Image (tube, grey):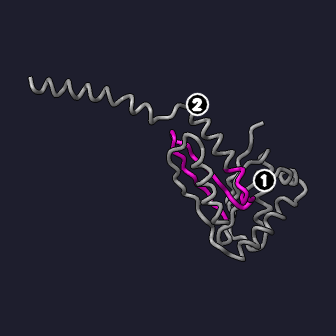
Amino acid sequence: MMSARLAFAFIVLSIMSLPGLAQNAASPKAEERISKEVRHELLMLPYLTTFDNLAYKVNGYDVTLAGQVVNPVLKSDAQNAVKRIEGVEKVDNQIEVLPVSPMDDGLRRRLFRAIYGYPPLQRYAMPVVKPIRIIVKNGHVTLEGVVDSDSDKNMVTIRAKSVPGVFSVDNNLTVTKS
């Protein structure tokens, strides 16, 4: 008799706690809205350059920020901008601040000229927010972003590898499907 009452009480408490769980989970529509707003806020950051890579993941009402930045202020600016978005409850900031290095700064400038100054790739230099991100860490280059074709992706890799002082190139560019 006692165990039947305990089982009944457990079932009632379990049912009562279900609506609380449903309130913590975001609907797909809410997640999509938050995702769009996070993307917008990150792209509008004033110190965002071609040499920074910001990524994010939305899980319910929680946002995880990732990527690499040259300017440490950009890391905190990104977190503060995302915190202000309506519906965001928690921000996990995992953005890496790249080490200060005059050698890497010189590489960034040379890589920019080699990629965006090359006539077949100059169309990528037109937008304010450049689609090809150039990340340099201790002479190692990572390319992030999007290009229009596989041949452009290969051309960017060849141009990056031709810059003196580059130790390695990881090409993470994605090709847009037209």
| Left/right of residue 86 with respect to residue 166 in the rendered view | left
In terms of sequence position, does the residue under pointer 1 or pointer 2 come before the other?
A: 2
The crowding category of the residue bearing disc 1, from other C-alpha atoms within 10 Å (few below 14, some 14 to 19, many at least 20), is some
Q: Residue 150's spot in the image, x, y percent?
A: 77, 47
Label 1 vs label 2: CA separation? 29 Å
As for residue 56 lying within the magenta part, the answer is: yes
The crowding category of the residue bearing disc 2, from other C-alpha atoms within 10 Å (few below 14, some 14 to 19, many at least 20), is few
Residue 4 visible in the snapshot: yes
Judged from the image, the secondary structure of the residue bearing numbered disc 1 is loop
Residue in front for this viewpoint, 83 or 116 = 83
In the rendered structure, which amino acid carries the disc numbered 2?
A: Lys
In the rendered structure, which amino acid carries the disc numbered 1?
A: Lys
| Left/right of residue 166 with respect to residue 30 in the rendered view | right
Which residue in the protein does label 1 denote? 130
* Residue at 72% over, 61% down: 51
Residue 31, quarter of the rendered image? top right
* Residue at 65% over, 72% down: 138
Residue 29 badge: 2
Cβ atoms at labels 1 and 2 below 8 Å apart: no
Q: What segment carries the magenta color?
A: 42-70
Residue 134 visible in the snapshot: no
Q: Residue 26's spot in the image, x, y percent?
A: 50, 34
